[in-house]
Image (tube, rainbow, N blue to C red):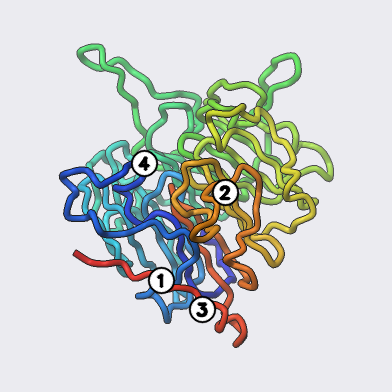
Amino acid sequence: KLEGSKSRGQLLIFGATNWDLIGRKEVPKQQAAYRNLGQNLWGPHRYGSLGGLRVRSVVSGPCAAHSLLITAEGKLWSWGEQDPSREHTWEPNSESGIHPGNPHWDKSGSVFAFGENKLGQLGLGNQTDAVPSPTQILYNGQPISKLGCGAEFSMVMDCKGNLYSFGCPEYGQLGHNSDGKFIARAQRIEYDCELLPRRVALFVERTKDGQVLPVPNVVVRDVACGANHTLVLDSQKRVFSWGFGGYGRLGHAEQKDEMVPRLVKLFDFPGRGAAQIYAGYTCSFAVSETGGLFFWGATNTSRESTMYPKAVQDLCGWKIRSLACGKSSVIVAADESTISWGPSPTFGELGYGDHKPKSSTAAQEVKTLDGIYTEQVAMGYSHSLVIARDESEAEQEKLRKLPEYNPRTL
């Protein structure tokens, strides 16, 4: 979400840095060359090769084994797992690399996309394995001000509050009232993917007696994508959700997939609206206009799911600046602290440090970041990125004391 981030600072990283090791004791045979690359970082590290860089924004996502950052001067850097070819770029590259479908945005409001495009998730009008360099999406509406990426679909929002979606419609996550399923030859189920940005035209609410009514005048202000679901915040502080309903991640007290954006009832009351939205892999968060954090869905899918928005008691009274989710972990920047939690297995993305508990089901302060002011947090599938403020001499000194991570090259 790139709308003129005002933060500036140094990049810190922790968590998994070798994606081939996630969930495995060792790297698979065909990846033997990468065996000694990229250990799990259990606490915050400065990123060696980016030492002098002032960072304005960091981006990753709950499905992403890659990262993007935007410098204070507006340069884009990228690094991470280059699936599907299984190539790796451990060193950040300025504006290069193939990464899982990732539209990106420039000052003029144009969007460029690169990475996997098997299901049309780059909005280029075709379905191809991979697009290796940034390519402008086929869109000629109003300038785009925000965007979101799911596992195999993308959303863009224009400056007038219209929302467009493209990619795979399998669970209704595109919001066009269809899951796009059709029976292809040999009885195979395939999906009619949207290859170009298509406007999301209908927003609905469901009444107590089950009637579905259109909601008029939805002006979209923010969008967030999970693996297979989408959240929207509108100008009236209402929240809509749609797509995959499993684990209650849509917040409608049922696990049904929703094919069009549906109003989340809890935030549709005067003084009870939402101010921020965030989507995890199988969960959702909203910060209310009074500052309370609400959660629904599941971070631990082996436990009970939360079927509708509930207040996160652990964070009651904290002023939340930034929140990000990985596959099942959560990180929050609030007041002077950084807070994280997530069930096992974790790979260091909680940042608790060496020889400390690796996971936590309750929200915990990240003590390794004591005295470091976090401007913004981002989280990938199993790694975390933090922009740490470095304005005062004391802040810089604190950061200098952190260990440095230097990816080993082959």
Quick one: which residue is furthest to the right in this view?
A: 270
Q: Is residue 277 visible?
A: yes
Neighbourhood count class around disc 2 (C-alpha, 10 Å): few under 14, some 14–19, many 20 upward: many
In terms of depth relative to the viewer, which is nearer, 81 or 244? 81
Amino acid type of the residue tagged 3 in the rendering: Lys
Q: Which mark is on residue 401?
A: 3
- Marks 1 and 2: CB-CB under 8 Å? no
Neighbourhood count class around disc 1 (C-alpha, 10 Å): few under 14, some 14–19, many 20 upward: many
Q: Which residue is mark 2?
A: 330
Helix, strand or loop under label 3:
loop
Q: CA distance from mark 3 to mark 1?
A: 13 Å
Q: CA distance from mark 2 to mark 4?
A: 18 Å
In terms of depth relative to the viewer, which is nearer, 59 or 310? 310
Helix, strand or loop under label 2:
strand
Amino acid type of the residue tagged 2 in the rendering: Val
Helix, strand or loop under label 1:
strand
Q: CA distance from mark 1 to mark 2?
A: 21 Å
Q: Residue at x 20, y 12 (%)?
A: 186
Q: Which residue is mark 4?
A: 23
Q: Which mark is on residue 47?
A: 1
Q: Quadrant of the C terminus?
A: bottom left
